[in-house]
Amino acid sequence: MKNRLKVLRAEHNLTQAKLAELLDVSRQTVNAIEKGKFDPSLPLAFKAARLFKLKIEDIFQDEEL
Amino acid sequence: MKQQTGLTFKQRNKLNTVHLAKWTLAWVLTLALASFGPLLLWGEQNTLLSIVAVMINISAGIMMILANKRHLAGLDELLQRLHLNAMAITLGGSLVFGLAYSVLQTSGVVSLRQGISHLMMFMGITYLVCVVVMNKQLGAEDEE
């Protein structure tokens, strides 16, 4: 699954640590999601979408599409 | 974003880790007391004190298990998966290599007797190595 988390984080001038705090996860998790090493659960994806005021599909995209 | 506890993930995780460390230390100390107490403190003939020491050790052990459970439940989804994988490898490795060694011992290929303490060491080291390696693979040390 591809995602735009790193781009959105940069646009909002957030560090990985700050984004992790806002999402209530560890910095490793933010890092792993950004690098595509870990796909978040649906609740975490919704949380990210709420935070950036976007739809889930605006942040996360299926790589097969 | 804070949960109902009013603590951030980092604060909650630190608190749970400290809690786990305290109960682990209590368990180790009470285990030492139960092991060496009959020899060094109250004498082997005093079975009542030995039983009390073991009961205290079991109580501390139960608290350690609960603290560990709480620590794992407090982790986020990635870290929970990491620890689940580490536990799977540790449990599987202990079963496979422990029984393989037992077979080699029974068939007389190796003569060195291994006790439960060696198995505990094997499990501890395997778990630690797994957590460190998987943390590294996930790029935990990467820059922001």
Image (cartoon, rainbow, N blue to C red):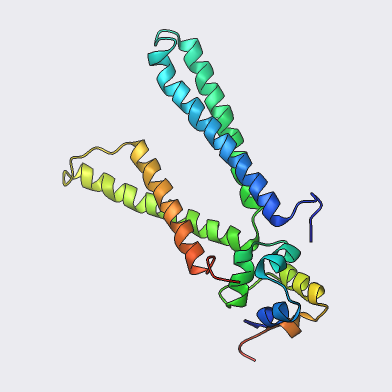
Tell me where residue B60 appears, x and y as whole percent. 57, 30
Which residue sits at x=64%, y=48%? B14
Which residue sits at x=39%, y=14%? B40
Vertical placement of residue B133 versus B49, above or below: below
Tell me where residue B137 appears, x and y as whole percent. 48, 68
User: Front-most of A7 and B133?
Assistant: A7
Q: Residue furthest top?
A: B45
Tell me where residue B36 appears, x and y as whole percent. 41, 20
Quadrant (top left, top right, bottom left, bottom right) of the N terminus of chain B: bottom right
B82 on left or right of B77 = left
User: Front-most of A14 and A62?
Assistant: A14
B40 on left or right of B83 = left
Which quadrant holds residue B19?
top right
Which quadrant holds residue A8?
bottom right
Which residue sits at x=54%, y=70%? B142
Q: Residue furthest bottom?
A: A65
Tell me where residue B138 appears, x and y as whole percent. 52, 68
User: Front-most of B32 and A42?
Assistant: B32
A37 on left or right of B112 = right
Vertical placement of residue A48 versus B116, above or below: below
Which residue sits at x=71%, y=66%? A18
A15 on left or right of B20 = right
